């Protein structure tokens, strides 16, 4: 009954954990796609924070197995914002499973999710790009909507979960919506990132539970700006300068030090050793940080 | 091994997410019913808040697929309060699955869970009613209890999860307890709701993560009180009056407006557009709100 | 495809629920071991709190079914701390499943998890002992590591989840690492517990969501100290003495009373009836409490 070739249904929402919203979304997927493995990526996206949700999704999506992503951070629910499903062009990932219910041991899982489902507000965009771009997209139609009676405030339950269940079960995009130009999908503005000889100016993308502050910059950006290896850097936040050091591990840092390190997503992050760097530096997501090679190291 | 016809085991508790209580309850179900799909409705019910748990469950239960509900919000654990399992009378939902382990493609999932398991403190009552009422009920006996040694403070692990696993696996109510009169099950008092020509007085049932305040009233109650369509209303909270407006979508509201809207459960809710209405109005669950058609609109 | 004989993969981390860390760890297990049932024990271990994680795990592990435990509370990630997998000696629990993908109805689930995977920082130790001790252990090698490119800060995704998936799928310890002496595994210091005639001095191990404070002492320790049955005790916290009473149920306590009770893990706990005892007494994990038979009861 469970076919590994179909992969899983991955859920990401801002519904939180305190009431039944997230659980009910799970239940509806499972009701309409019995046997579908459910993986909660997170339901802890800050309320209405499309940008944070898009980041979590884009950082995750290349490591997921095959399947269908349902993402719901949807301040425009009930408005005329489009609801969409997107297929991605990665070879093997986007091929919908056969309708056969039996296991197909000879079919190997593809490299990633084949479909992403959610509101057309930019939430899916970065993840879609990380998977190689949209091969096709549809605007979801009322055909996919369940529960016509009550108010339209819960599209996770009433629209996105049923559509994801149908795609997981073998439906095609055209079964669930009307084709739209993938180029018309809403895009979020890029994060702030300015690299010059001598400095990197980068947006803080996220602060994780341990206080690490993920930046929009990558190690190659630092190299272009003239710092690399394990050199000293200056970190400027809101006018205040803090000395830092390029490191490759939390354990390379002394108790009072701040480090700049490549994180698990290949991004630069501001880190400390068992202390929350974001609190030490006073940065939050959306802040902009400037990093430069320390002058003292060159004199 | 996984039989979709059996449905899932749905869990709702006030155990929270910070330690192993909820996870262990899941594990015990799975240990005793290998292959059972587990769906966490939520483990975030406020501690001891039977009323909130009962609401989450009653709002969810009609959208769940077939299976068994385990609900544990249980301030009386270890006392002489009864532990119960209830079967519901909905046609097709309450029929226990055959003991056959194989898939039965010809059998379609019924409309909802067939069993609810938990303490007899009112937690299950509204959900049972939403499913059509109790067909039968039993008081759980020590036969179902595991782990006789340690103190009796964790019936989720020691009693309710094992019983749910047995029911999911094909046991009948009489296998897990002694028959009791379904009419003897504990009932929670109804929420406050008084409707007259000119006003609706309604209890705030829940405030969700987005600050929407769900009320005990339904749109039909508003219609009886004389407001409907998209008219102006007055919202009285603790003596203070706030102007509001009947809307059908968050997006219908301006930045500073408060709306009254039918929510996804068919209840009226106090809402704002991307702001927490409950904070704006200063209401919490259990508070009583009075709503009237705005006089200015009729003069 | 799903073989109940293999059991589940149980996850415990300090990743929290607010971003994608925990969900991604789940997804990687499922990608590499399609069909594996996933059970989140918790992802709410306080950040870096190896001791709390070790307690949650040791309290849980005897109630889990067969399978593989992945535990990640790992302040030393990226340093030279070892990453390990341990097999336990419990008869039947440690036997790796056959490589056959088909179900084996004749094979019964063993009594507990056969493998534990995680950092070698003491996190796994108490749980390993609770399962009967380590039969063998390996230091994980780079063979098990995925995603060589990015920074080494996320061993849950890159090392522990893939190794757990391989063990669940039938790999042996020697397939995933190099043998090490189980006696060389890092051990956490024992909690404070001093028992004499007339007093029990015990560390507070954990405060649960309901405010119950679990102690390092057991009922037998109380009996040795001269209190038992339902007698009166004195509870000394930071110099202040509070009267208490030995009880066997929350419901035995009056509104203002503090009780000492055997909890669901067979430990003594400080409890109140629907109030948080830890707040009433002002205790936190790591504090030491002294309990003595009340003098007044003997005069």
Image (spheres, coloured by chain):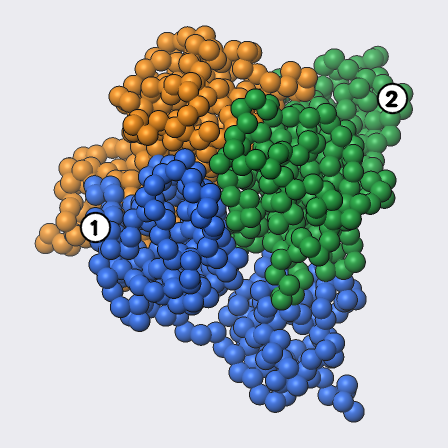
Chain colours: A blue, B orange, C green
> Disc 2 vs disc 1: which is toward the camera?
1
Q: Residue furthest left?
A: B299
| In this rendering, position of residue B37 left or right of residue B224 | right
Q: Depth check: C248 or C73 in front?
A: C73
Element on which disc 1 rests: helix
Q: Do discs 2 and 1 share a chain? A: no
| In this rendering, position of residue B135 left or right of residue A251 | left
Q: Residue furthest right?
A: C197
Q: Which residue is mark 2?
A: C198
Residue at 20%, 37% (x, y): give it. B221
**Which quadrant, please, contains the C terminus of chain B?**
bottom left
Q: Is residue A123 above or below residue B220?
A: below
Q: Depth check: B13 or B209 in front?
A: B13
Q: Is residue A284 visible?
A: yes
Instruction: Tell me residue A102's x, y (percent).
Output: 39, 38
Q: Depth check: A77 or C245 in front?
A: A77
Q: Is residue C270 above or below residue A58?
A: above
Q: Chain of mark 1?
A: A
Q: CA distance from mark 2 to mark 1?
A: 73 Å
Q: Which residue is mark 1?
A: A142
Question: In the rendering, which numbered label is found on residue B111?
Answer: none
């Amino acid at each position: 009954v469970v076919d590994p070739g179909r992969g899983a249904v991955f859920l990401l929402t801002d519904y939180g954990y305190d009431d039944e919203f997230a659980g009910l979304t799970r239940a509806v997927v499972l009701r309409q796609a019995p046997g579908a493995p459910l993986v909660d990526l997170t339901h802890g996206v800050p309320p209405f924070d499309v940008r944070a949700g898009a980041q979590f999704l884009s950082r995750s999506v290349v490591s997921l197995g095959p399947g269908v992503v349902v993402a719901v951070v949807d301040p425009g629910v009930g408005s005329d914002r489009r609801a969409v499903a997107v297929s991605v062009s990665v070879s093997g990932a986007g091929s919908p499973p056969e309708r056969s219910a039996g296991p197909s041991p000879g079919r190997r899982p593809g490299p990633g999710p084949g479909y992403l489902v959610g509101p057309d507000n930019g939430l899916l965009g970065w993840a879609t790009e990380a998977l190689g771009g949209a091969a096709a997209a549809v605007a979801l139609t009322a055909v996919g909507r369940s529960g016509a009676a009550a108010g339209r405030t819960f599209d996770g339950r009433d629209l996105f979960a049923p559509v994801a269940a149908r795609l997981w079960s073998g439906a095609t995009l055209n079964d669930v919506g009307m084709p739209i130009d993938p180029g018309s999908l809403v895009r979020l503005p890029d994060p702030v990132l300015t690299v010059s000889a001598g400095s990197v100016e980068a947006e803080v993308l996220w602060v994780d539970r341990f206080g690490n502050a993920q930046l929009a910059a990558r190690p190659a950006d630092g190299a272009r700006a003239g710092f690399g290896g394990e050199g000293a850097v200056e970190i400027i936040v809101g006018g205040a300068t803090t000395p830092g050091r390029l490191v490759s591990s939390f354990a390379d840092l002394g108790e009072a030090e701040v480090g700049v390190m490549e994180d698990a997503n290949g991004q630069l992050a501001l880190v400390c050793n068992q202390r929350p760097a974001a609190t030490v530096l006073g940065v939050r997501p959306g802040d902009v940080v400037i990093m430069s090679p320390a002058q003292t190291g060159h004199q």
